[in-house]
Image (cartoon, coloured by chain):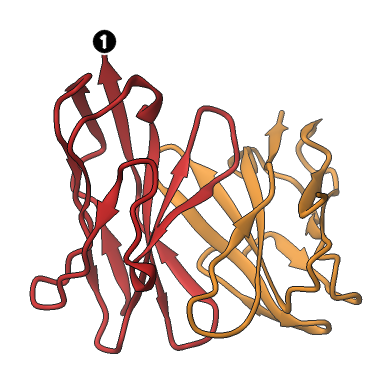
Amino acid sequence: AQRVTQPEKLLSVFKGAPVELKCNYSYSGSPELFWYVQYSRQRLQLLLRHISRESIKGFTADLNKGETSFHLKKPFAQEEDSAMYYCALKYNYGQNFVFGPGTRLSVLP
Amino acid sequence: DAGITQSPRYKITETGRQVTLMCHQTWSHSYMFWYRQDLGHGLRLIYYSAAADITDKGEVPDGYVVSRSKTENFPLTLESATRSQTSVYFCASSGSGRGETQYFGPGTRLLVL
């Protein structure tokens, strides 16, 4: 079955420090991976999608099929990055998504 | 820029009452979804719809009913609300095709007393 894991429930870093939010998936087919961000009491917003290979708000993520991972990275964390981050896997070419449990990032001053 | 909207944004109800949460999107997306968000569980899919009059169960459908008579609307009904259905409910929509992502509504906070 398709599954997404995010091992850290909470990740705290100091402002200016590098941050990496881990995401691993299990899926036998060709995956599409996404990162969503949810700021306090707001809706989920798309942050990154792996097929775009883009950098948004300084964040990047690389799909590693060998390790079945899609970790989210940023070299210098900012306080405004504090939010809940969800990794999501799209499968079966339909629009079926499975979300990870989320990681709460707290960037300390 | 209407996008995807949900109503009501906040709802308090009592156990046993019927509650309907509304979701409306203006993009003519074919796919629509309902999720519930709970601490420790993240997002869990309740129901989804691939097109008007086509719906299917997600991970946690028990106690919920959906309909989709029009492409733009996807109401979620709790037939007899229970305390365990206290949650934040998010509606989402998506176009078809590779690379399409889901766009989320603002959420409805439901409290069942």
**Residue closest to the eye, B104 or B113:** B104
Q: In which quarter of the image is residue B107?
A: top right
Q: Residue B81: x, y in percent?
A: 74, 46
Chain ID, mark 1: A
Q: Which residue is at the far top?
A: A109
Q: Which residue is at the far left?
A: A66
In this picture, is A45 found above or below B59? above
Q: Residue at x 49, y 41 (%)?
A: B38
Q: How crowded is mark 1: few (under 14 residues within 10 Å), some or many (20 or more)?
A: few
Q: In which quarter of the image is the C terminus of chain A?
A: top left
Q: Quadrant of the N terminus of chain A?
A: bottom left
Q: In this view, does A39 lie to the left or right of A14?
A: right
Q: Which residue is drawn at 80% across and 73% down?
A: B28
Which residue corresponds to mark 1? A109
Q: Residue B37: x, y in percent?
A: 53, 45
Q: Chain A hue?
A: red
Q: Residue A22: x, y in percent?
A: 19, 51
Q: Is residue B47 left or right of residue A24?
A: right
Q: Residue at x 77, y 35 (%)?
A: B9
Q: Chain B hue?
A: orange
